[in-house]
Image (spheres, grey):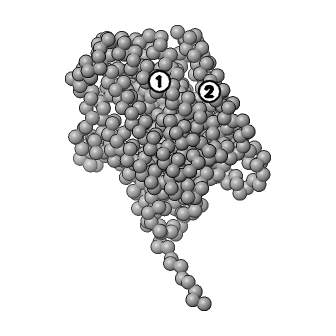
Amino acid sequence: MGNIIFIFFVGYICLLFFITWLTSRKADNKTYFTGNRKSPWFVVAYGMIGASLSGVTFMSVPGDVATTQFTYFGVVIGYILGYFAIMYFLLPLYYKLRLTSIYEYLGDRLGEEAHKTGSVFFILSRLLGSALRMYLVIYVLQIFVFDAWGVPIWITAVIMIFIILLYTFKGGIKTVVWTDTLQTTFLVLALILTIHYIFKDLNFSFPVIWDKMESAGYTKVINTDWRSHNYFIKQIIGGMFITIAMTGLDQDMMQKNLSCKTLKDSQRNMMSFTGILVIVNALFLLLGGMLMVFASEKGIDISGMPTDRIYPEIAFNYLGMGAAIVFVLGLIAAGFSSADGTFTALTTSVCYDLIEIEQRYKTEKQRGMVRRIVHILIAMLFLAVIIIFSNHHNDALIRIIFNVAGYTYGPLLGMFAFGMFTNRIIKNGKLIPAIAVIVPTVCFFLSKYSEQLFNGYKFGFEMLIVNGFLVFLSLLIISEQKAKEVIDPA
């Protein structure tokens, strides 16, 4: 099986580099950073599906049905509300200011300290979050494919990161927009074909499978326990603010939107993307329910299995060669589409927010050299994080790091909200970095001990709102009303 999977893998990489060759010809710095603002909105919309659904989502959303049923759909409803907020509040602001890095807005509105803080927090969160997501993809491939060949995990990691480095190196965001369409296609294809293989193996009609899911309790969407972390209202509100913070205030996701020709094109892209994303997430939940029914019908014991292992375990060991191949290609597509945009976005943020490439370097040649060096350094950092975790793999530690990375979006939410919804100015900008560190730390401990502090209440996604609100409140305290301009009558 391993040799056949490898052949398909090589074919996939060849197709990826063919698209790279087509899109990176005559590429320059503007192509890399903005795609020359000529990306077709429908291509961006379709490709963003793969970018928003990482390899972790690819495995965890179906697997989590075992413990949380279909309650994740409440988060998806929240996504819809969040994307509408991005469409009508954030995108008009970004297009009006003609931003390359969205954190330039914080510099213009709140000062240099806010600009640097926002950028650093994005870089840390994305570097840790995306590298760990890519690591988990590599880890699963290592277990099910490369271990059988005796290939060490660090070599697998080097190969994967080197591939992403090569195909994003020249064309940047323009290449990513088009390669993400390929990634999305394989991801969705893997999802649909796995559903097909389960139908074929069980030989059940859809109503029969649905009845079995329903009788086992997997189709439950609404959790009415207000103390629970997945209480329905919490899911909706949390999903909305997660989308605003982790998409609307995220350079990776917004850089693709800002590569569209006009604001209207970008809004069309976001509207289409939202509709497709809802359908794809619904299919992932359906797949999760079907995996549970399959396991029950085949006598597969999944009770002690980590939920992230359920999908790959069944795909590799019980559904045949075809399912194993489409799973691997779908997983690679999910991993690549999450990481490639991150390479480009981190390079953009470092160049524009920290180095200030436009101000410091006057020629395109100099800027191109700096951009390429930064891109390589980002790839090396990415690889370093992956290799460190491969040597100290710990599921509990990985979850903590993911959670900590999530907390870092709270300061971004608070700073952008303060800038957009008040006209106050910061008195002492040097306090902003301290606030951005202290508030998420307080929120982390609030979440950890919430059951003891709040009568059994468990924080879920709504902790992001608390985080952002406390940052907003802190900025109010260190700010003052902007003085009115006095017109000299003379």
Q: Is residue 488 above or below residue 244?
A: below
Which of 390/315 is in front? 315
Which of 233/453 is in front? 233
Element on which disc 1 rests: helix
Could you tell me residue 14's position as x and y percent?
Answer: 64, 22
Element on which disc 2 rests: helix
Neighbour tally class for label 1: few under 14, some 14-19, many 20 plus, Cα within 10 Å: some
Please say whether residue 46 is visible from this viewpoint.
yes
Q: Is residue 24 above or below residue 371?
A: above
Q: Is residue 36 above or below residue 159?
A: below
Please say whether residue 128 is visible from this viewpoint.
no
Q: Calculate the distance from the C-alpha at mark 2 to the C-alpha at mark 1.
A: 16 Å
Mark 2 vs 1: CB contact within 8 A: no
Q: Residue drawn 53% across and 79% down?
A: 485
Amino acid bearing label 1: Leu
Q: Residue drawn 49% across and 19% down?
A: 326
Q: Is residue 86 left or right of residue 138?
A: left
Could you tell me residue 427's position as x and y percent?
Answer: 52, 69
| Location of mark 2 (residue) | 16
Tally of numbered discs: 2
Could you tell me residue 185's position as x and y percent?
Answer: 51, 27
Could you tell me residue 48's position as x and y percent?
Answer: 51, 38
| Location of mark 1 (residue) | 189
Amino acid bearing label 2: Leu
Q: Earlier in the sequence, mark 2 or mark 1?
A: 2
Q: Residue drawn 63% across and 36% down?
A: 175
Q: Is residue 446 left or right of residue 326?
A: left
Neighbour tally class for label 2: few under 14, some 14-19, many 20 plus, Cα within 10 Å: many
